[in-house]
């Protein structure tokens, strides 16, 4: 079972550990991604889950990576309950390996990381930063430091096997709380320079708690554990709401032509077909605002 764990050290470090291999593999299967695209989408999914774990129950976060590389756009949406969904605009992207690793930065290119936090009734928070590397983890750390003034260490990893399946996915995030001693921050910076890649830890069988321990090397009090899964809330009723938003004239035009409205969910690929009879029912049951 994919899991995200939160913990705290006596020295004032807030630590998050995540293993979401099955979730990222499900995303790969849904979208039919090639290895470079799988790694990029997996990192954005994992990053969104780590960010969402800092929010309250009725909130959620959206991450959009928009670059000039062949992937074009990667998007993920996550909530504090561990539910996540995402997509990549061009799933069939595979670049040559760079330094024997999947070239996510090359596939993303130059561009922007956009973050939207829905805060449950309050004004949403929007933040945008220029991509630093396109490798996602460094870009997230840069966003947290510059847009939210929260210094953070972020590591993300996805291992794609020779059969194109995702065999490891996850990450960790470390944030010093206000008042954390400078020597602790110096210690952490030095330690993280030598910590092995997250994907290697997961391939060796480490869970979120072991990843957290290996990352910080200090005793951690584990304070929360969340099950993670790929979840899309799309439904026929939501699609009908979206069709209603087209407006009365457009719906009447579909009915007049005897055409159905066909919709494929971008996140889970579920297909919905609204036939003319259902459109007539929608037209009757919708309260239209006078122009």
Image (cartoon, rainbow, N blue to C red):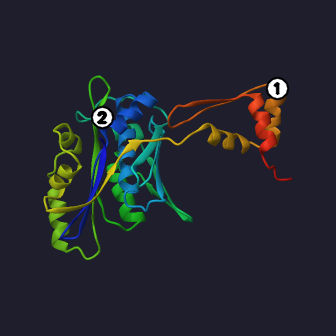
Quarter of the figure that contains the N terminus: top left
How many angstroms separate mark 1 from mark 2 (CA)? 49 Å
Q: In the image, which disc is placed on residue 46?
A: none
Return the residue nearer the eye: 12 or 272. 272
Q: Residue furthest right?
A: 291
In the image, taking residue 215 as reference, residue 225 lies left or right, namely right
For label 1, the SS is helix
Whether residue 156 is visible to the viewer of this picture, yes or no, is no
* 39 sits to left or right of 195: right
Q: Residues within 10 Å of mark 2 (few under 14, many from 20)?
A: many
Measured along the vertical axis of the image, is residue 10 above or below residue 2? below
**Residue at 28% in and 70% down:** 177
Indicate the position of residue 17 as horizontal and vertical percent values.
26, 52
Judging by the rendered image, the residue that carries numbered circle 1 is: 257
Please tell me which residue lies in front, 192 or 205: 205
Residue 102 visible: yes
Tell which circle, 1 or 2, labels the residue nearer the N-terminal end. Answer: 2
Q: Position of residue 175 (x, y in %)?
A: 28, 64
Which residue in the protein does label 2 denote?
102
| Element at label 2 | loop
Along the viewing direction, whichever of 68 and 286 lies nearer the viewer: 286
Image position, residue 155 (x, y; %)? 27, 50
Q: Where does residue 279 sit, x and y in percent of width and height?
A: 76, 34
Residue, x 30% and y 61% (percent of image)? 152
């Amino acid at each position: 079972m994919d899991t995200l764990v939160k913990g705290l050290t006596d020295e004032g470090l807030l630590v998050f550990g995540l293993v979401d291999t099955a979730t990222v593999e499900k995303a790969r299967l849904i979208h039919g991604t090639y290895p470079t695209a799988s790694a990029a989408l997996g990192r954005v999914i994992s990053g969104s889950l780590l960010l969402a774990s800092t929010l309250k129950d009725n909130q959620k976060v959206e991450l959009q990576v928009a670059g000039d590389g062949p992937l074009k756009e990667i998007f993920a949406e996550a909530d504090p309950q561990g539910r996540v969904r995402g997509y990549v605009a061009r799933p069939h992207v595979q670049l040559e390996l760079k330094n024997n690793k999947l070239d996510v930065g090359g596939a993303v290119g130059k561009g922007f990381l956009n973050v939207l936090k829905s805060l449950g009734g309050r004004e949403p928070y929007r933040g945008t930063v220029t991509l630093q590397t396109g490798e996602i983890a460094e870009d997230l750390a840069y966003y947290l430091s510059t847009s939210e003034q929260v210094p953070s260490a972020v590591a993300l990893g996805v291992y794609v096997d020779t059969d194109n399946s995702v065999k490891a996915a996850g990450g960790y995030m470390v944030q010093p709380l206000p008042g954390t001693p400078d020597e602790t921050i110096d210690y952490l910076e030095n330690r993280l320079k030598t910590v092995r890649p997250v994907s290697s830890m997961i391939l060796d069988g480490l869970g979120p708690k072991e990843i957290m321990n290996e990352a910080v090397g200090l005793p951690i009090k584990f304070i929360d554990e969340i099950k993670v899964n790929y979840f899309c809330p799309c439904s026929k009723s939501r699609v009908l709401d979206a069709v209603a938003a087209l407006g009365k004239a457009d719906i009447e035009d579909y009915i007049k032509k005897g055409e159905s409205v066909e919709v494929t969910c971008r996140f889970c690929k579920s297909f919905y077909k609204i036939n003319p009879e259902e459109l007539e029912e929608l037209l009757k049951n919708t309260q239209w605002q006078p122009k």
